[in-house]
Amino acid sequence: MSTTGTVVPDIGPGRPDRSPPRPSLVMRLHFYAGIFVGPFILIAALTGGLYALAPTAENILYSDLLTTDSAGPTASVAEQVTAATQVRPDLTLDAVRPATEPGTTTRVMFTDPSLGESERRAVFVDPVTAESVGESVVYGSSNALPARTWISGFHRHLHLGEPGRIYSELAASWMWVVALGGVVLWVRRYRRGGRLLTVDRSSKGRARNRNWHGSVGIWIAIGLVFLSATGLTWSKYAGENITELRSSLNWATPGVSSSISGDAPAPPGDHAGHDMSAMAPEADVVSAGIGRLDAVIGTARAAGLAGAVEVTIPGTADTAFVVAQTRGPWVFSTSSLAIDGNTNSIVDTNWFSEWPPAAKLAAWGIALHMGILFGIANQIALALLAVALVTVIVRGYLMWWQRRPSASAPPAGGLRRLPVRQLVPLAAITAVIGWFVPLLGISILVFLLVDALLGLRRRASTSESP
C-alpha cells in the first residue's frame, strides 16, 4: 500500500500486473464490514464453536441422568411414566421420550409454570427398574439440558434477551456478504498471479497474513454462507420475512392435527420450542392417557414410525396423542402421527416424505447448523469451521494494523464513479436485500452514505490543493 492510499495488488513473482490498480466497491465493502462487523462475527464464531460441541459435552456432563447400568427386560412405558408422576405429582404430565437403546434413560416431561418459555421439567427414569434417576430442566424441541441451553442462549443473544439478538442477526446478515466479497477479491488476485488455495510459507509479515486470510477464507466460504443462511432463520427481523416468504410459497413446515374433531392447529416451525397449550389439561384425561401409552406407541411403530420418538399426552378428551420422531444423529426424517387413544386409530399423518423440498432442506439445514445431523462428525466439522473463521478474522485485523497509519483504508467515493448501467441494478438489488434482511440493508446504507461523504471530502481537498 502506498502512502497515497492506492491499493497495490499482491502478485506472484515474475508476473507483473500492467493494469493500473483500481480499488472497487467490493473491496471497500469487504474492508469496512471486516473492521466494523468483524467483532460480531468473531463472537458468533467463538460461541458457535462452543455450541457445536455442546451435544457431546452434554452427554458427559449429564451422564448420570442420560445413562444407566441396569440390565434386563424393560418395564412398560406406562409404568415408567407412572414412576415419574410419583416424583412430581405437583406438575402436569406433558410428554414422554421412551428409551430406545439399552443403557439409556426415558425422559418424562412436565409443564412447570415456574419455568420460562419453551422450558419443561424432565424426570429421567431407568427403563429396567422403573425408578427415577434424577430430574432437570430441558429446553425446546431438542430437549437441551441446562449447559447446552446456556451456550445456545449465549450464541443467540449473549443472554441479553431480545436486544442481544441484534448482535447475532447482524453477524448472520453480513457473514455471507463478507465471505462472497472476499472470494471475489481473492479470485481477482489469483488471476493476477497469486495463490488460490495454499499459503505461501515463504512470505513474511503482512503478506503472510494476507495469504492466510485469503486462502483459508476460500476454503471456508461455502460453510460461512450456509451458516449465515440457516442462522438468519432464527433471527428476529429477517427470520420473520423468511417465515412469511416460505408460507406464501407453500414451503412452510407441515404440522399434524391433534384434534379428534378435525380442527387443524397452526403448523409448527422448524426450530420452535414446545408449544404450551392455552387450554388447561384435565387431570382424569391425562391419567387415563398414561395407561394407553404402550398401545399408542405400538400403533405408531406398526405404521412405520421408527427410531426415537416423543409422545405428547392429550390433556382433553377431544385431543389425540401425537407421536413424533425426534432429531438425532443420522436422522433425516421427522414424521409424526396423531392417534386416537380410545380407538388406537390414526386420525392424522405428517410424513416427512410428503414435505415440500424447501421444508426438507430447511429441516436438514437447521439440524446441520446445530451439530445434530451427522453426530460427532458434524460437531467436529463445525468446531473446525469456527476455529478457521476466528483465524481469518484475526489475520484480517493484523493486516489492517500492519498497514496503518497512512493507508488504513481503501480510498472512498468509488460509488459516484460507477456508470448508471451498473448503479441502477446495484441500487435495486440493495433495496431488495435491505427489505428482506433489514439490519444488513440499514448498515449497507450507512456504509454507502459514509463512503460517498468521504469521497466528496477527498475530492474537495484534492481540488483545493495547489
Image (cartoon, rainbow, N blue to C red):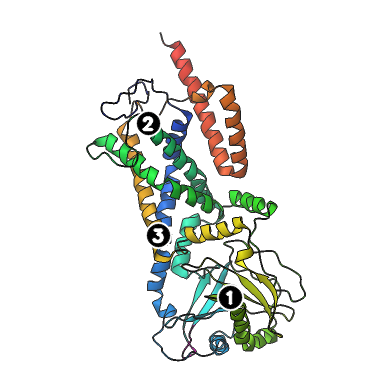
Residue 126, magenta (yes or no): yes
Please give the residue where the numbered disc 2 appears in the rendered image.
191
Residue 305's label in the rendered image is 1
Q: Residues within 10 Å of mark 1 (few under 14, many from 20)?
A: many
Q: Residue furthest left?
A: 202
- On the image, the x and y values in percent for residue 453 come to 51, 25
Task: Name which residue lies at 48% across and 29% down.
Answer: 25
For marks 3 and 2 on the same chain, the one whose residue lies earlier in the sequence:
3
Magenta-tinted stretch: 125-131
Residue 80 versus residue 191 in the image, above or below: below
- On the image, the x and y values in percent for residue 178 come to 46, 40
Q: How many marks?
A: 3
Task: Name which residue lies at 44% across and 80% down.
Answer: 104
Q: Amino acid at mark 2?
A: Arg
Specify whether 419 is left or right of 45: right
Please give the residue where the numbered disc 3 appears in the rendered image.
50
Cα separation, mark 3 vs mark 1, equals 33 Å
Identify the element where label 3 is drawn: helix
Q: Amino acid at mark 3?
A: Leu
Identify the element where label 1 is drawn: loop
- On the image, the x and y values in percent for residue 411 come to 43, 25
